[in-house]
Image: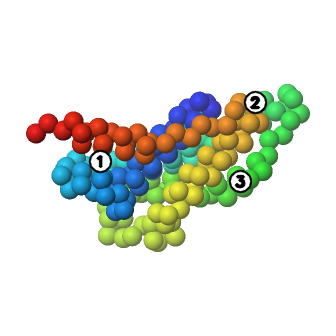
Amino acid sequence: MINDIIKTLRHAKACHEAWWFMFDESQAHILNFRRKYISFFETVKPALYTTFVIKLSSIFDEDNRSISLRTLMKEIKKSADNTNEIFQAKSIDFDDLWKRGRKLFEYRNKVIAHRNRNISTKNFAKETGFKYSDLKAILDDALMFLDEVLLFIGRREFSRLNVTSDFTRLIKDIDCNEIL
């Protein structure tokens, strides 16, 4: 279960990072490619955002059959019963993280997964108090929480991948080898 959550958060982090990096107006070398390959980037932009929201929100699913932070907590508690060790996150309030993650899950359900026709005329994010800037905080807090869980069970911290450096090299390689 923990390996699935690690993969899910890595995927979400990579999508979020690529989404912000590719569409950051201060990235001049990316802007040139965006202008040149507008159809590609206009397709990738919502795909990255959608995948990011789906992946991140999935770890806040309340279904007992799903792999979520809540089911992970139950597993940790079960195994801790045998050792008398109690896991308590030090830097993250799990209940607060779960509450914010559930709001993201609701957003995902109403706007992405099950596109409600009554929502299309409303600003669901605004009406629920959910802001797009909250996404990064939920991601960062989920990653920090996972770090604490991994340390508790005796594994090293979650490794942080960085796709921006790979993407920058890719753009430079394409630019240098472009055949037209």
Q: Of helix, strand and loop, which one carries label 1?
A: helix
Q: Residue furthest top?
A: 82
Q: Which mark is residue 44?
A: 1
Residue type at mark 3: give it: Ile
Front residue (pair 21, 174): 174
- Label count reads 3
Q: Of helix, strand and loop, which one carries label 3?
A: loop
Q: Residue furthest left?
A: 180
Q: Residue at x 45, y 66 (%)?
A: 125
Location of residue 63 in the rendering, given as x and y in whole percent from the top left corner: 57, 42
In the rendered view, tell whether residue 132 sits above or below residue 72.
below
Residue labelled with disc 3:
92
Mark 1 surroundings: few (<14), some (14-19) or many (≥20) residues within 10 A: some
What is the quadrant of residue 165 in the picture? top left
Residue type at mark 1: give it: Val
Q: Earlier in the sequence, mark 2 or mark 1?
A: 1
Front residue (pair 105, 94): 94
Q: Residue at x 31, y 61 (%)?
A: 117
Q: Residue furthest front?
A: 176
In the rendered view, tell whether residue 51 sits above or below residue 81.
below
From the viewer's perspective, is 135 left or right of 154?
Answer: left
Q: Which mark is residue 154?
A: 2
Q: Is residue 75 visible?
A: no
